[in-house]
Image (cartoon, rainbow, N blue to C red):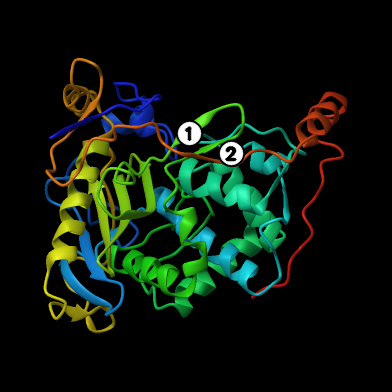
Amino acid sequence: MVNIANPETKTGIRGYALQETSRPHRAAGRLVKTFAALSASVLALTSVAQANPKMVIDVRTGKVISHQEAFRKWYPASLTKLMTAYIAFSAMKSGKLSPNTEVVMSKKAADQPASKMYFKPGSKLTLDSALKLLLIKSANDVAVAIAETVGGTTENFVAQMNAQAARLGMSSTHYVNPNGLPGKGQYTTARDLAVLALILKREFPEYAGYFSLEGVSTGKKNYANYNMLVGRFPGADGMKTGFICASGFNQVSSATRNGRQVISVVLGADSLAGRTDQSADLLQMGLTAPTSQGVSIASLAPYGETQFVNDVSADICNPKAAKVRSESRDDAGRMIIKSPYVQEMTRPPVYAYAGLIPGSETIAANTSARDNTANVPIPIPRPTF
């Protein structure tokens, strides 16, 4: 058992663990806990104890080593940003963009809810820095800025996200925004996320380093990776975490040992510590399973409930759940990680630089002082894929 401290960790329902994509809605505690099936448009309200989709897959063979409720539709939360990164990587690999491409913070981007960087409209950063902040800090404002840089508008970018999802065979996934904030019609499955993570690993090995950073620094502030396995689980090298009330605590993870790489997906865990424990246990299972074990993910047939998008808000965002999470910390406020496969980090995290382009913040501040909305640079539309 390991106790993990984070410089921004707070107890309570509005603490650090609940700010990756959005803050809890005050009305969440009033949601009905019973399953409602009045029509195809009604969401399924499912207990976390009953629904907790999982999967672990071997990257080289594409074989699914273990799976549970893999086709149950779920809110991706900030796991959405994996597809945002996929499209940005595609643009870089094709030469349409480069790591040094300027990403401009528009007013629309700056207006996104937390988690965010709070950069002023007109601020500029490189695409390299933007991707680091997207994947490590899970910045919603940066996600929109990347979308506008790549697609010209968020609408065009989201269309690309859905086109790519269809092309990749993510048949139970649909996106409505590039950051994973709550939105009607945004859903995925553990199976589809495993497909996306697998393709990210196979198609873009040159960009794998973005996922394995222990933290990022703007030069003014340091941000540790929300993925607590990086630096603590032997061989952990990615990938992304996510949270909104409706999804619970989500995580896609990867690890490599002795030349073998596996990916795990956990959806709907009841706490940050819980998703860390589950992810570690799945990765360990995958890394130690026989290489011949499993069935190809392409041949895994749909099963179970596949119609409704599950909503666990009532289980996650209520005072009782918050109390349980606060009690899962030691006297020093550190999260108690129970998995025996997670080790104590005995050194400070290594932070990669991901700040604004020098001088752009001053220009943005001056522009904002003259007019909050005028003269904000508009990203140039990019060719569609």
**Horizontal and vertical percent for residue 121?**
74, 36
In the picture, measured across the screen, residue 128 lies left or right of residue 32, that is: right
Question: From this viewpoint, which residue is outermost toward the top?
Answer: 331
Residue 273: image quadrant is top left
Mark 1 crowd level (few <14, some 14–19, many ≥20, 10 Å Cα): some
**Horizontal and vertical percent for residue 217?**
55, 35
Q: Image height check: is 320 above or below 50? A: above
Instruction: Tell which circle, 2 or 1, labels the residue nearer the N-terminal end.
Output: 2
**Horizontal and vertical percent for residue 67?**
17, 66
In the picture, measured across the screen, residue 205 lies left or right of residue 376, that is: left
Residue 186: image quadrant is bottom left
SS at circle 1: strand
Residue 314: tell me if it is visible. no
Looking at the image, which residue is at 49% across and 54% down?
210
Residue linked to disc 2: 112
Residue linked to disc 1: 223
In the picture, measured across the screen, residue 366 lies left or right of residue 1, that is: right
SS at circle 2: loop
Say which of 210 and 366 sits in front.
210
Quadrant of the image for the C terminus?
Answer: bottom right
Dot 2 amino acid type = Gln
